[in-house]
Image (spheres, rainbow, N blue to C red):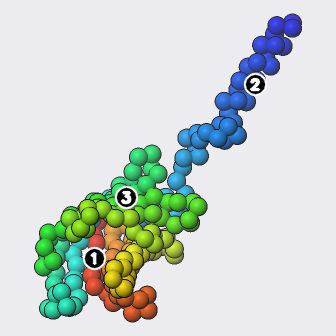
């Protein structure tokens, strides 16, 4: 009888130990689930999209421009990130990019790594990251050199199961951003 009680206590203790990984500082599969914002963005954008874009007239493109391409969005490993693959051809040349989005609970926003052929160093982490609010994904980045600041804001809006609009704004201050690219996406 004593052996049976000892064996039962040992089994219960072992089960308690194995079912309480958080108390030991380990993460189990359920604690690796992405936050609600990542799940919502992944659900909204995952898939293959055809894109067409318009470039607003500017000092770089005095007559503006047009182009088309593809965006492919998919969940990253274990659904803990979102991956974007971008390719376009247009009046601004041929562009390819690869983005990785993940949610940082401590900052309350997405961090975004963007690698592309038009990034001089190859990759950059967006300085302001991204937020998901009211069904819109908003990315922001600030760069500066020699006393000048350039802001970029990219907004994914009007997201439906079959389409979305992606607008890229640029400027020297948040109150004077101008739409430089307007991209219309349609699910393939």
Nearer the observer, 59 or 49: 59
Q: Residue 145 carries which label?
A: none
Give the percent coordinates (x, y) of residue 24: 67, 37
Among numbered discs 1 and 2, the one appearing first in the sequence: 2
Q: Can residue 30 be seen in this view?
A: yes
Which structural element holds mark 3? strand
Q: In which quarter of the image is residue 11?
A: top right
Which structural element holds mark 2? helix
Give the percent coordinates (x, y) of residue 125: 38, 64
Measured in 3D between alpha carbons, the distance from the residue under mark 1 to the one under mark 3, in whole angstroms, is 21 Å
Q: Residue 13 carries which label?
A: 2
**Dots 3 and 2: beta carbons under 8 Å?**
no
State left or right for residue 102 relative to residue 51.
right
Total marks in image:
3
**Dots 1 and 3: beta carbons under 8 Å?**
no
Measured in 3D between alpha carbons, the distance from the residue under mark 3 to the one under mark 2, in whole angstroms, is 42 Å
Give the residue number, with chain letter if any, for mark 1. Answer: 184
Give the percent coordinates (x, y) of residue 32: 54, 47
Q: Residue 100 carries which label?
A: 3
| 93 to 61, vertically: above or below | above
| 99 to 179, vertically: above or below | above
Q: Residue at horizontal 25%, vertical 68%? A: 119
């Amino acid at each position: 009888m004593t052996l049976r009680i000892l064996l039962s206590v040992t089994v219960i203790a072992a089960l308690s130990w194995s079912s309480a990984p958080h108390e030991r500082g380990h993460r189990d599969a359920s604690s690796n689930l992405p936050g609600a914002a990542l799940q919502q963005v992944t659900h909204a954008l995952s898939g293959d999209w055809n894109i067409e874009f318009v470039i607003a007239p500017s000092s770089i493109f005095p007559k503006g421009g047009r182009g088309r391409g593809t965006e492919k969005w998919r969940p990253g490993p274990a659904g803990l990130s979102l991956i974007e693959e971008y390719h376009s051809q247009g009046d601004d040349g041929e562009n390819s990019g690869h983005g990785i989005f993940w949610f940082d609970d401590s900052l309350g926003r997405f961090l975004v790594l963007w690698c592309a052929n038009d990034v001089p160093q190859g990759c950059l982490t967006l300085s302001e990251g991204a937020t998901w609010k009211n069904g819109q994904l908003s990315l922001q980045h600030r760069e500066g050199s020699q006393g000048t600041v350039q802001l970029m804001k990219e907004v994914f809006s009007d997201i439906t199961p079959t389409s979305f609009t992606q607008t890229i704004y640029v400027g020297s201050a948040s109150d004077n951003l101008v739409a430089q690219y307007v991209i219309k996406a349609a699910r393939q």
